[in-house]
């Protein structure tokens, strides 16, 4: 029996009966060390029966000042003690806690301030992935926060309803800082949002998916995080920091905000039995109308909002069915049972899914749109590795451009800070319906070519760059990243291509 068929049958069995060891949350690959767990156990060493209640990251309530600014206080901290495996303690990093961080929720039009204190004992940053912010507030590699220091970026939220996230973006160290646990969700609300499930933790549920590898004593295996082609590919899946998770469904419909926060793994998320569900949102916001699917493919950094309906009393496994190396574009993707949904015998009624979601229609690029080309190779973009002092592209504010991405090597993805783009074509064809919403990250299989319609904002700063890069964190850390600045239209040729020494800010 093929590995994929075996795991699918195991997941189906798990959907019917609680606690079966065959429905495991670990992949088919086991640790390479000599004391790998015995057959019937997950590679993490624990029995996999979806016996752990899904942890829901708490909502962080902001302090509202006299000036109306909503301040979110965040502390990055090391030395956390987390129990992922029964009876074993794992040392982790987190934001305002031992592992991961709270969910930040704000509305369009809010003035927000993030008060970020670094208690890690080493330099880091915190980037607002998916947020449209001034470059100096972006939290990229130039906005370093020294140990003990506090950084307080602020801006006015001016974008439609969406799901973003925050994570470190320190040059050459992002992979390790994220792997140890520094990440959290950002939810932006908009009064134009249609009637969708929205009670946080009840019928509006975040799912932060990460792969880990554990030592036998419970420690995180960090040996491969900063090495090899991909960095570390884990064999145990955490959802919101929970291994072998289940969620108790109490409503007929549930909205899931799914984030791939793994360092390198790609997931094709769906349900055992390939039941249909609807995608309602992509990285940057809602679709114009729901897209019915049975799988969504998410590379690191990508998000999807989906709505799924449940029947009373049913149990359904959320899984990821991988593709072969040929299908995936290298490397081969593994199969995982991610978690289980257990529906109550009686479910509260949910409104029907709206036929129109109110997502912002795509703006076609003008006929004379500037076309920029980017070639992806092993760890380079356009044959260059990252240089913190070099400006690679200069863009006029408000521009609508076409970016053509040509991946000449193994699988990558492509993320652009500040913007939301639309996929015009992937390998000469339109994207599937569920990928036609606003995006900030796109998966690029081996040999793939994409055309993106990119719309830039109005924040101008010729001395503070935004990033574009591969969001496979090992690739990013190795230098697969470039920099662009947004400037007043007509001044592009006047902008220096080398940053002044003071452009990199150390907050201490």
Image: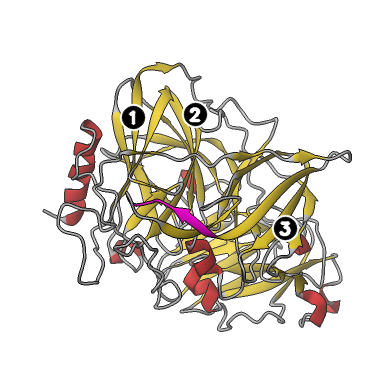
Label 1 neighbourhood size at 10 Å, few (<14), some (14-19), many (20+)?
many
Apparent side of residue 40 relative to residue 324 in the rendered image (left or right): left
Apparent side of residue 335 relative to residue 82 in the rendered image (left or right): left
Label 2 neighbourhood size at 10 Å, few (<14), some (14-19), many (20+)?
some
Residue 375 screen position, x and y as percent: 53, 76
Apparent side of residue 60 relative to residue 180 in the rendered image (left or right): right
Residue interval drawn in magenta: 79-85
User: Quadrant of the rendered structure where residue 14 is?
Assistant: top left
Q: Secondary structure at mark 1?
A: strand
Q: Which numbered marker is on residue 342? A: 1
Q: Which sits in the foreground, 461 or 424? A: 461
The colour scheme used to paint the residues is: secondary structure
Query: Given this view, does label 2 or label 3 mark the residue nearer the observer?
Result: 2
Q: Secondary structure at mark 3?
A: loop
Q: Is residue 63 visible?
A: yes
The residue beneath circle 3 is: 456
Residue 428 screen position, x and y as percent: 47, 61
């Amino acid at each position: 029996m093929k590995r994929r068929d075996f795991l699918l049958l195991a997941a189906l069995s798990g959907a019917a009966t609680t606690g079966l060891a065959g429905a495991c949350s670990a992949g088919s690959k086991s640790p390479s060390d000599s004391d790998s767990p015995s057959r019937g156990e997950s590679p993490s060493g624990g029995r996999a029966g979806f016996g752990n209640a899904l942890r829901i990251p708490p909502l962080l309530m902001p302090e509202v000042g006299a000036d109306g600014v909503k301040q979110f206080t965040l502390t990055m901290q090391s030395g956390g003690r987390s129990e992922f495996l029964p009876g074993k303690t794992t040392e982790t990093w987190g934001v305002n806690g031992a592992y991961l961080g709270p969910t930040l929720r704000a509305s369009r039009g809010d003035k927000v301030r993030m008060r970020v204190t670094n208690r890690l004992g080493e330099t880091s940053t915190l980037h607002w992935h998916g947020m449209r912010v001034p470059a100096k507030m972006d939290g990229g590699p130039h906005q370093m926060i020294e140990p003990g220091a506090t950084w307080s970026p602020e801006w006015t939220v001016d974008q439609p309803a969406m799901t973003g996230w925050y994570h470190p973006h320190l040059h050459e160290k992002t992979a390790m800082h994220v792997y140890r646990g520094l990440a959290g969700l950002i939810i932006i609300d908009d009064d134009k949002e249609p009637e969708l499930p929205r009670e946080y933790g009840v019928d509006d549920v975040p799912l932060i998916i990460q792969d880990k590898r554990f030592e036998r004593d419970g420690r995180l295996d960090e040996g491969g995080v900063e090495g090899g082609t991909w960095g570390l590919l884990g064999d145990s899946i955490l959802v919101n920091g929970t291994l072998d998770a289940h969620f108790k469904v109490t409503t007929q419909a549930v909205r899931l905000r799914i984030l791939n926060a793994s360092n390198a793994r790609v997931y094709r998320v769906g349900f055992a039995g390939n039941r249909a569900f609807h995608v309602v949102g992509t990285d940057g916001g809602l679709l114009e109308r729901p897209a019915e699917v049975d799988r969504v493919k998410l590379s690191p950094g990508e998000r999807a909002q989906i709505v799924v309906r449940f029947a009373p009393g049913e149990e359904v496994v959320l899984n990821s069915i991988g593709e072969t190396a040929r299908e995936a574009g290298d490397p081969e993707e593994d199969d995982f049972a991610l978690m289980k949904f257990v529906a109550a015998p009686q479910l509260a009624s949910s409104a029907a899914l709206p036929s129109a979601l109110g997502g912002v229609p795509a703006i076609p690029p003008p006929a004379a749109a500037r076309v920029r080309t980017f070639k992806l190779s092993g760890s380079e973009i356009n044959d260059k590795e990252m240089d913190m002092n070099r400006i690679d592209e200069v863009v006029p504010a408000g521009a609508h451009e076409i970016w053509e991405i040509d991946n000449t090597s193994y699988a990558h993805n492509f993320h652009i800070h500040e913007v939301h783009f639309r996929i015009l074509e992937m390998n000469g064809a339109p994207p599937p319906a569920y990928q036609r919403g606003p995006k900030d990250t796109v998966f690029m299989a081996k040999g793939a070519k994409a055309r993106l319609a990119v719309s830039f904002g109005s924040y101008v700063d010729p001395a503070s760059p935004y990033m574009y890069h591969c969001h496979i964190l090992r690739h990013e850390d190795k230098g697969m990243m470039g920099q662009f600045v947004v400037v007043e239209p007509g001044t592009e040729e006047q902008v220096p291509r080398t940053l002044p020494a003071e452009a990199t800010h150390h907050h201490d």
